[in-house]
Amino acid sequence: MGGDTKVRLHRLERLILKALLEMGDSTTFEIAQKIGVKRDAIEVASLWAAEKGLVTIHTESRMLAELTKEGWDTLNNGLPERRLQHILEKGPINISKLKKRLERLDIAIGWARRRGWIIIEGDSVQLTEKGFKEISIELPEEQIIKNAATAPVPITKENKRVIDELVRRKILRLHTEKKKILSLTEKGREVATKVGVSVEVSKLTPELIVSGKWRDVVLTPYDISVKAPTIYPGKKHFMRQVIDYIRRIWLDMGFKEMKGPILDVAFWVFDALYQPQDHPARDLADTFYAETPSHGELPSPEIVDAVRMTHEDGWTTGSTGWGYKWDENEARKCVLRTHTTSLSARTLAKLRDDIENGNIPAKYFSVGRVFRNETLTWKNLAEFYQTDGIVVGNVSFRHLLGYLKEFYNKLGIRKCRFRPAYFPYTEMSVEIEVFDERKGVWVELGGAGIFRPEVVKPLLGKDIPVLAWGPGLERTVMNRYNIEDIRILYMNDLEILRSARLWIG
């Protein structure tokens, strides 16, 4: 049995059994001191021994009293009533003078009167005969305060009343101490008398084999079914991982990044994209308008006039326009951008000279925050991310679909499709949908198309094919991370952040 036991028991289990055989019932702290091992290690090993039926573990609790901050002050300076007693030892003193010499005089007087140490006559306070007699007699409270300075004081029947009073006076506070007591079972006692305490090694080395010491050691068994501890390494928020990954995709596909203001004039957000000034999307119910600054600057008069005429009568685009009087003041209003397509409009205006010099094709992308005046729900946010892209040059609708398929393929999405759609500033237009493998459904992500001449010509100066798209990111992330409520993406839930796998496409 001894050899068999050596294999099945950890060295700490053997030490615990030997200690209990010698000491009898003991706490884990006492065993740790006995064998010179950390208490935490004994706690763990005792659980192993208990699972094998070798020991029983029961927990005992007791209440202890320890000094508070007020208690430490009392230890150093004495009880308020004791300080008052010493002051009055030389004779009666007026209350007004006592107030200057003793803080919290009301507490000192209250307890001194309760103990029968003082009397008050008019404004004068003096010691009683009992007060003089007990000057040198230590109170039970003082003894407990001294003891608590050394170690927490256990509550007993004898001291409970005094401790309760000191707790009410906020000189002491109570806490519960729990200790685990180990006892040998019959099986444990039998094993303890036969078991040896051998040296354990985790691997068999050449030195052990050559020296022959392998005969005197026990190889530690490995349980490969035991779950390894979870490690939570530092990592970026998964939304930041996605944004960085998408940026890398566009750069790898030869695109340049376009950036611009979050707070922009309505001209770039709406007017330059051929959205009429009475369009519902420009209403306060859908768009955040800034109070300060309320208005901003417009681009060059040449571009502004071209956009104005396009809205009013179609200008030279071949369109009849929207047929209303365009208001420059409305275009100057400052709004939080409702889409990153405003950056596409700004970029087209900057490309005006490049196009004149024949520097095409041009490919640009953006990844940024946009804002909508939405009610927050499980599927809607007031602030979210969008990725926009434009390709300027001799390109067609088939190129548009090719770019989008390549993008989603690099994102790890193998199935995507395009449904005919309508958008005010693109024609032809499509709705982008990807297949959610987990749910078995198609999910709508955003729109794409070819910019209409009413958008391109006022900004570029000529009508050139411009592919454009602007899908959101959140739904893609929700599908990948199995998140049902879009609000969770930005709640910084520690458990979700820890468990979220790295985005690797």
Image (tube, rainbow, N blue to C red):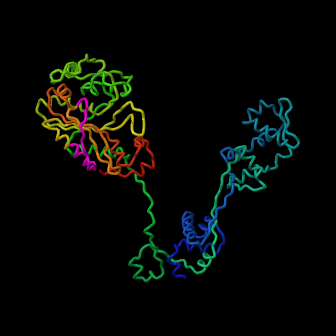
Q: Who's the residue at 19% across and 44% down the image?
A: 402
Displayed quadrant of residue 269:
top left
Displayed quadrant of residue 367:
top left
Instruction: Give the side of residue 431 with respect to residue 40, left or right.
Output: left
Query: Farthest residue in the right direction?
Result: 129
Query: Farthest residue in the top direction?
Result: 325
Front position in the image: 415 or 200: 415
Is 42 one of the magenta-colored residues? no
Q: Residue 473: horizontal and vertical position, in percent?
A: 32, 41
> Split into 4 quadrants, where in the image is the N terminus?
bottom right
Front position in the image: 223 or 233: 223
Query: Farthest residue in the left direction?
Result: 358
Above-or-below relation of 347 to 173: above
Displayed quadrant of residue 401:
top left
Instruction: Give the side of residue 90 with respect to residue 462, left or right.
Output: right
Above-or-below relation of 105 to 295: below
Q: Residue 492: horizontal and vertical position, in percent?
A: 43, 44
Q: What's drawn in magenta, residue-wise? A: 403-425
Front position in the image: 130 or 493: 493
Q: Who's the residue at 17% across and 35% down the image?
A: 392
Query: How many numbered marks appear?
Result: 0
Q: Residue 279: horizontal and vertical position, in percent?
A: 30, 24
Q: Residue 307: horizontal and vertical position, in percent?
A: 21, 22
Front position in the image: 98 or 321: 321
- Res. 346 in view: no
